[in-house]
Image (cartoon, grey):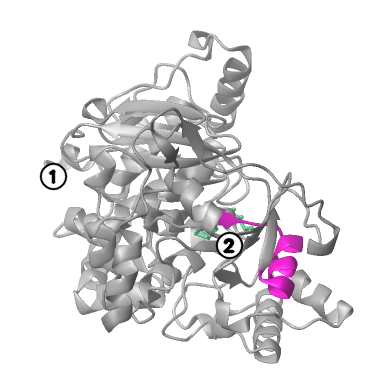
């Protein structure tokens, strides 16, 4: 990620129209290009972009506020920033009482910074608290056509609304706080078109994993991916967020999906959504946010969804994934030397032999949660599998709502009871075992079935062996004590 540059020092090298002019077609532009162009203040090698919404969490903002303090600068638009606490918060019963020294200090500093600058904060223990990428959408803060940033790579999640949403570094967080702008090189564009109907029991997470397995962890490098095609259009907003959340795991700067009636229905009536005549005006505008026919992408991939079923990762990056019916591949089968070496190393770390059926991999930990799969729809999908069943005696299973609001809604529906009765720990909201920095860790050497998005070495704790799966598959794995899909329990929807 580029370091920030101050507006006054940027070379204002003006460049021609950002859309592509083609004979006879007029100016045609991608969705990403349209949203980007609306926000350009000054063009150059990097464009100076206006930022509509800045989300903050406790981990990547303290140094940015410290930078402002040292420079004696105020926050330019505190009304366009919203903060919460998620990464380092404990998720056990009464999280406030469980705070350790570092987390307590981080939260105190966050509270002081937000109070000093007049920034809305949803602190631990408040009803609006949650994983930053979960609370933005549920408040209706993240809307089509916006530029949204946060000091966190999974900000890509919010592109599901047709917004340009980027993770940024801490120095860029400071720049946005001070100026409400950001210097960004215009990203290249990639279309990932997913066509057809996936096999029964296939979730958005399975699509996201299958897409990365197909295009690779570098397949989207430097691009802003627009996910399109009937398989994407058929997804509810929660599923679209899951797909965009994982754009970053294919190397992309972000992911996006054109807003449509599904998007508008999700946003209508939310706390911060426009109302009345403003809503009507917003809709008129949002309906124009789509890629023009004939617009060219820098890169394209077309994926046949009908071949996709439930997936699970076997290695240490999300592209090292295959169908749950599959086996651990032989590294020798990879033509590319780098991929072969990566597979060898992954199998050594994961302690897996080539040819092992994925279903023969025992798991002793199951984690359902994170900004990938910690929304209400995800908890419902897992609870549907768990209802009337028990977690295997060899398994420790956690269900961690992505936000305090999700937790409350799930409890209103009785999902907490389903999980508890099945032997799950029902937790408070936070990043939890996705990142393993808050006390929620996988034991060294243990295999976990996890609904999160990253499976690199020690991601979920030192020596942890992570298998990325969907919520329904995580639940089925909890019941059977090995990697499984809901179909293995006769549950196929
Ligand atoms: C801590 C944060 C900067 C990081 C990110 O940027 O994604 C985290 O959320 C993660 O998922 O690894
Ligand atoms: S839930 Fe995981 S991926 Fe999402 S922001 Fe938290 S640590 Fe990052």
Can residue 19 be seen from the camera position used here? yes
Q: Secondary structure at mark 1?
A: loop
Side of 310 relative to 6 (left or right): left
Residue 198, picture quadrant:
top left
Measured in 3D between alpha carbons, the distance from the residue under mark 2 to the one under mark 1, in whole angstroms, is 39 Å
Task: Give the magenta-colored segment's residue range.
Answer: 166-180
Give the residue at x 34% y 55%.
288
Query: From what the image shows, is residue 379 above or below residue 16?
Result: below
- Above-or-below relation of 222 to 81: above
Q: Position of residue 482 (x, y in %)?
A: 33, 39
As drawn, the residue found furthest toward the right would be: 70
63 left or right of 85 in image: right
Q: Is residue 380 left or right of residue 335?
A: left
Image coordinates for residue 340, horizontal then vertical, percent:
58, 15
Label at residue 340: none
Image quadrant, ligand 1: bottom right
Q: Residue at x 40, y 61 (%)?
A: 144
Disc 2 residue crowd, few under 14, some 14–19, many 20+, Cα 10 Å: many
**Along the viewing direction, whichever of 56 and 126 lies nearer the viewer:** 56
- Label annotation for residue 491: 1
Name the quadrant containing residue 230: top left
Residue under circle 2? 149
* Tag 2 secondary structure: strand
């Amino acid at each position: 990620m580029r370091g920030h540059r101050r507006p006054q020092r940027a070379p204002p090298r003006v460049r021609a129209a950002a859309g592509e002019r083609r004979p006879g077609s007029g100016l045609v532009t991608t969705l990403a290009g349209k949203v980007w162009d609306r926000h350009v203040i000054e063009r150059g090698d990097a464009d100076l972009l206006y930022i509509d919404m800045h989300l903050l969490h406790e981990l990547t903002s303290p140094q940015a506020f410290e930078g402002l303090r040292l420079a004696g600068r105020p926050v330019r638009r505190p009304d366009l920033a919203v903060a919460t606490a998620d990464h380092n918060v404990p998720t056990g019963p009464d999280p406030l009482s469980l705070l350790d020294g570092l987390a307590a200090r981080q939260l105190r500093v966050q509270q002081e910074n937000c109070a000093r600058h007049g920034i809305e904060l949803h602190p631990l223990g408040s009803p609006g608290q949650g994983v930053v990428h979960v609370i933005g959408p549920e408040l209706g803060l993240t809307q089509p056509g916006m530029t949204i940033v946060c000091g966190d790579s999974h900000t890509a999640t919010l592109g599901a609304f047709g917004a340009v949403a980027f993770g940024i570094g801490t120095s860029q967080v400071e720049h946005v706080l001070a100026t409400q702008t950001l210097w960004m090189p215009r990203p290249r564009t990639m279309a990932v078109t997913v066509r057809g109907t996936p096999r029964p029991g296939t979730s958005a997470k399975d699509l996201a994993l299958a897409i990365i397995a197909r295009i690779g962890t570098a397949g989207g490098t430097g691009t802003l991916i627009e996910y399109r095609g009937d398989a994407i259009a058929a997804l509810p907003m929660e599923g679209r967020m899951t797909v965009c959340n994982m754009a970053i795991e294919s190397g992309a700067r972000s992911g996006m999906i054109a807003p449509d009636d599904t998007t508008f229905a999700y946003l209508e009536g939310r706390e911060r959504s426009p109302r009345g005549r403003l809503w009507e005006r917003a809709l008129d505008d949002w309906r124009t946010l789509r890629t023009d026919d004939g617009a060219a992408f820098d890169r394209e991939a077309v994926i046949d969804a009908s071949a996709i079923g439930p997936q699970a990762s076997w290695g240490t990056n999300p592209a090292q994934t295959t169908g749950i019916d599959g086996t651990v591949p032989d590294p020798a089968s990879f033509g590319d030397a780098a991929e072969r070496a990566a597979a060898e190393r992954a199998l050594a770390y994961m302690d897996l032999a080539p040819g092992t059926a994925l279903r023969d991999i025992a798991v002793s930990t199951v984690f359902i949660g994170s900004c990938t799969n910690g929304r209400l729809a995800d908890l419902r999908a897992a609870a549907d599998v768990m209802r009337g069943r028990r977690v295997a005696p060899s398994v420790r299973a956690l269900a961690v709502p992505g936000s305090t609001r999700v937790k409350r809604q799930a409890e209103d529906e009785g999902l907490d009871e389903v999980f508890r009765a099945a032997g799950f720990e029902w937790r408070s909201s936070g990043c939890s075992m996705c990142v393993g920095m808050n006390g929620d860790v996988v034991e060294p050497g243990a295999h976990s079935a996890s609904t999160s998005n990253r499976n690199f070495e020690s991601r979920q704790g030192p020596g942890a062996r992570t298998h990325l799966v969907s919520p329904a598959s995580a639940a089925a794995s909890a019941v059977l004590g090995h990697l499984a899909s809901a179909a293995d329990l006769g549950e196929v929807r």
